[in-house]
Amino acid sequence: IRARRFLSRSVAPHVERLTELFNRLEAEKQDAGLDKYWKKGSNPENLRLAYFLSFMPGNLYRMASVWCELSRLGFRWPTTGEASTFRAVEFGAGPATGSAGILAGEAHAPVGLPADGNFALIEQDRATLRLGERFFEAWASHLGLPPYTTRPFHRKLELRQGWLPSSAPSFHLWLMSFVLNEFHESPEALASSLLKSWDRHLEPEGLAILVEPALRLQSRRILELRRAILEQDRSGEFQVLLPCLGHQACGALADPEDWCHEEVAWWRPPYLRL
């Protein structure tokens, strides 16, 4: 990754192509691009490498930033019940990007994550899933964190089949990073499916973190999902922590040209500056 020739000829073209697929404003182009994303083509290994080197670090940092914001606001890991261990699940995990982001957040802005825990990684591409397992282990060691374990699950997400099998356990941490923008269903349908799954598979004091692109279409969609969740959660069982500290109406949705996102500064790896 320090070889300019290799990066410019074997990685950069894939990065440019992936940028065209990911940075979309129209849902039709987005769906068409994502459907072909991991299809076998010319040198799929370099395609995965391009994603891993270019997009994974930024997505990891996004998840870490959410964790750090929770820490800044005073959130602390619940100490009731099974305080000594935890179970996490990441949907559309790719190379364990979101889970690795949680590790980075805990390393720099700890909330008291137990030293014993397992991350279930759900991903539709086998090779990327294997890469995620290896990266997660090396990343945890690099950060000096406990040797958290992973469980890989090769599975394509289909909303009609549910997020998890009914026999799946409950989790303390539910992660979704750049996943919801791949679904056609309405925010109301997504909210209903998530609430049903959280009722069965999220611990009473569990935490769900959903991160989506900062583009107008995707940003407004997750704000609409937030509104739908609050409307459907009639018992008030769930509490929204971010981005708004409360259950008030979202001001960004009042104007169809408005959207809401957070901006954070980060330091790109040296090879990204070549």
Image (tube, grey):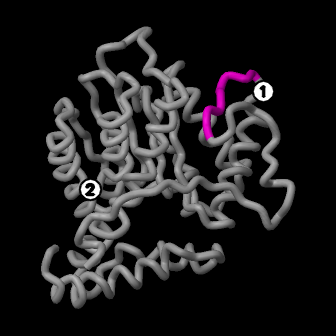
Residue at x 65% of width, y 48% of height: 190
Whether 168 is drawn above or below 90: the answer is above
Tell me which segment is drawn in magenta.
235-242
The image quarter containing residue 65 is: top left
Residue at x 53% of width, y 19% of height: 204
Secondary structure found at label 1: loop
Left/right of residue 165 with respect to residue 150 in the rendered view: right
Whether 109 is drawn above or below 179: the answer is above
Q: Indicate which disc residue 129 carries.
A: 2
The image quarter containing residue 131 is: bottom left
Q: What amino acid does circle 1 point to? A: Arg
Of mark 2 and mark 1, the one earlier in the sequence is 2
| Distance Cα–Cα, label 2 vs label 1 | 37 Å
Residue 245 horizontal/vertical position (percent) = 68, 33
Residue behind mark 1: 234
Whether 3 is drawn above or below 216: the answer is below
Residue at the farthest right position: 254
The answer to whether residue 240 is magenta is yes
